[in-house]
Structures are given as C-alpha cells and as structure tokens.
Amino acid sequence: MFERFSSTLVGAAAAVALFGSVAAADTWRAWNIHNDGHPNTAAMDKFAELVNTATGGELTVEVFHGGVLGSQPDALEQVRIGAIEVGNFNLGPIGPMVKEANLVSLPFIFKSVPHMFRVLDGEAGEIMASAMADAGVKPLAWVDAGARSFYSQKPINTPADVEGLKIRVMNNNLYTAMISAMGGNPSPMAFSEVQQALKTGVVDGAENNFPSFKSVGHYEVTTHYSLSEHLIIPECICVNTAKFDALSPEMQTAVRGAAEEAALFQRELWSVQSEQARKDVEAAGIKVNEIADKSPFQDAMGVVYDEYLAANPDMKKLVELAQATE
Ligand code: GTR
C-alpha cells in the first residue's frame, strides 16, 4: 500500500518535471451542432488542431460534429457543469442561462455585423463575457454568424406577412415575443427537428443565416428566403470556466490563442461561404427577396423592447452601450 502510494508520487513528480504542471495529458470533448461543409465545422477542427500543436499534445480536443452530444440547450448545460468542456455556441440559447447574453437577442439591436463586433469588443462585450464566465460558460473568442432572416413558402415583406404563420425559433423567450409581436405563432424547437417540421407543415417557416439554411437542407423544403435580417447573433468558442481556470497560465494562453486564431479563420471562411451558400440555394430555386424598408419590422419590435426592459431594467445599460456604439 505504502509502496503503491510512493510510486504514484514518483510518477506525479516525473509528470511535473516533463510538463511543468501537475496535470497529466488531458482530452476535452467539444460540441459542434454543424456538419461537414459548414464553416464552423472547419473552424472547430482548426481549433482542435491548434490546441494540440500549441500545447505540445498536453491537451487534445476531440470535436463531436452534427450535434451528436445533444441539443444546444442541453449541451450548454453540460458545458456549464463541466460534463462537456468546450463548444461552438450561439449566444441565442445562452440568454435563458445568462441574462447579459440576451443583449444580442434583441431584434435589430445591431446595425451590421461589424457593428456587432465593435459592441462585443467594447464595455458591453466585457460585461457579457464576464457574466457568461461566472455562469460557467466562458467565451474565449467570438465568431460570425451573419444575420438571420425568415424563410417560408411565401415571401415576407412586412410584419403583416408573418401574421398567422407558425415560425420555428430557437429556445429563448425573446424570440417567441418577437414572432408574437408580428402576429405569428412562435414554435421553439431544436435545430435538428426543423427540416422535418418544415417538410410536414408542422411549422410554416423558420429563420436563420444562409449557411445553416443550406447545410441542413431547410432550402429543400421551403421556397422563399426574405432578407429581414432581424437578428445578428454572434457565436462563441466557449469553455467550462472551472476547466479553463484549472489550466496553468501557459496552457491558458495557448488555448485562448488557439480559439482566437480559429475564430479569425472562421470569420474569413464565413464571409466567403455565406455568399456561396446564398448562390447555391438560389441556384437550387430559392427566391430571395430584399426588404427595402425594414422600419415596419423595427417598429413592431417596440413592444418587445418595452416589455423586456420593464421586466429587466438592469439590461438598459447594455442596450444603451450597444446603441451608443458607432
Ligand atoms: C445556427 C447556429 C446554431 C443553431 C441554429 C439554430 O445558425 O449556428 O448554433 O443555433 O442556428 O437555429 O438552432
């Protein structure tokens, strides 16, 4: 017994000498909802490769694509408690868990994707990132997810066109409020169920960016994509806070650096592949309509903001910070 104990100590001492820390080589599981062909899948593979190189193999990241580790709300909970270490998450489903993250789920809060990144790089982004880290889901880097627009079996040009339509949304009360404010019927549903729901008419429409519209075949079961661009929601490479904090400072720098580099890679891929996804779905027969005047949609969101800020007055500061950002 004593001998076993002492040889464990000798082993640990050897590991310290080799790796400069008490942690032995470790493997992290990474969640990714997307399949091959989506820019975020390539970015998560890149993240894994960069972590492996930067840590000299001391930390390995195994990426599980296609949402096989669970739906996004489930996977977020897993990351929060440390059962999954890391993932590429959309901030929409983080809102119900971390109130500050809901800033990005207010329709039309950002003027453009560059504006969104400027807000994230400023004080509002810092407040959101630290609230997320406190909740156990720490963002290491932000990635691009473009703008989300509606798609259905008919063009949508005004909020009145949404009236009476059953529209799938992600899991967040702000999105149900958004659809209700236009007179539609919101239907929160997991991403993996949407194609079938569109196909069978369980829902009349949904909303997403071009790469996701294409990659999971929603374009095969709808006819019109209407450029409402009502939500510009960033995504993150997010890690379980305790697992990250337990790394040595050198390892933290390596992992953060890998996430930042993978995010830059993702943003470049995104700009090329989202254009391409639009061309591909148009070539497959999808009619894309511009909406010249989006103000009726923005006006319809007044009630969403009023009710949300009345119930969450502490969110006013973040909204003001975003609105004051040029
Ligand atoms: C995609 C996003 C996913 C997921 C999905 C959805 O654009 O990248 O993380 O949130 O939308 O609509 O559920």
Image: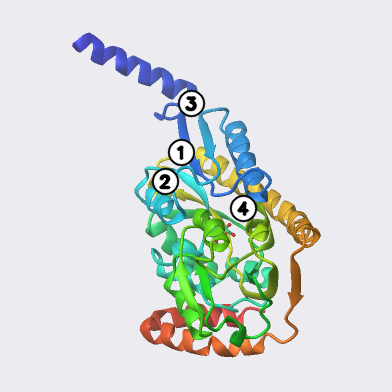
What residue did someone put label 2 on? 245
Disc 3: CA contacts within 10 A as few (<14), some (14-19) or many (>=20):
some
SS for dot 3: helix
Q: CA distance from mark 4 to mark 1?
A: 39 Å
Q: CA distance from mark 2 to mark 1?
A: 8 Å
- Crowd band around label 4 with a 10 angstrom C-alpha radius: few (<14), some (14–19), many (20+): some
Image point (54%, 61%), residue name: 200
Q: Nearer the viewer, residue 210 or 270?
A: 210
- Say which residue label 1 marks: 248
Give the quarter of the figure containing the N terminus.
Answer: top left
Say which residue label 4 marks.
Answer: 216
Residue type indicated by callout 1: Ser
Q: Name the residue nearer the viewer: 103 or 161.
A: 161
Residue lying at the far top in this picture: please name it.
3
- Kind of residue indicated by mark 3: Phe
Query: Comparing marks 4 and 2, which lies closer to the viewer?
Result: 4
Q: In the rendering, at what x and y percent does residue 301 appear?
A: 54, 85
Question: For the residue labelled by badge 1, is the local secondary structure a helix, a strand or a loop?
Answer: loop
Regarding mark 2 in the picture, which secondary structure is present there? helix
Residue contact between numbered discs 1 and 3, judged by CB atoms under 8 Å: no
Q: Quadrant of residue 165?
A: bottom right
Question: Disc 3 or 2, which lies upstream in sequence?
Answer: 3
Dividing the picture into quarters, in which one does residue 17 lie? top left
In this picture, residue 225 sits left or right of residue 26: right
Q: Position of residue 61 (x, y in %)?
A: 53, 36
Q: Amino acid at mark 4?
A: Val
User: Residue 19's mark?
Assistant: 3
Local SS, label 4: loop
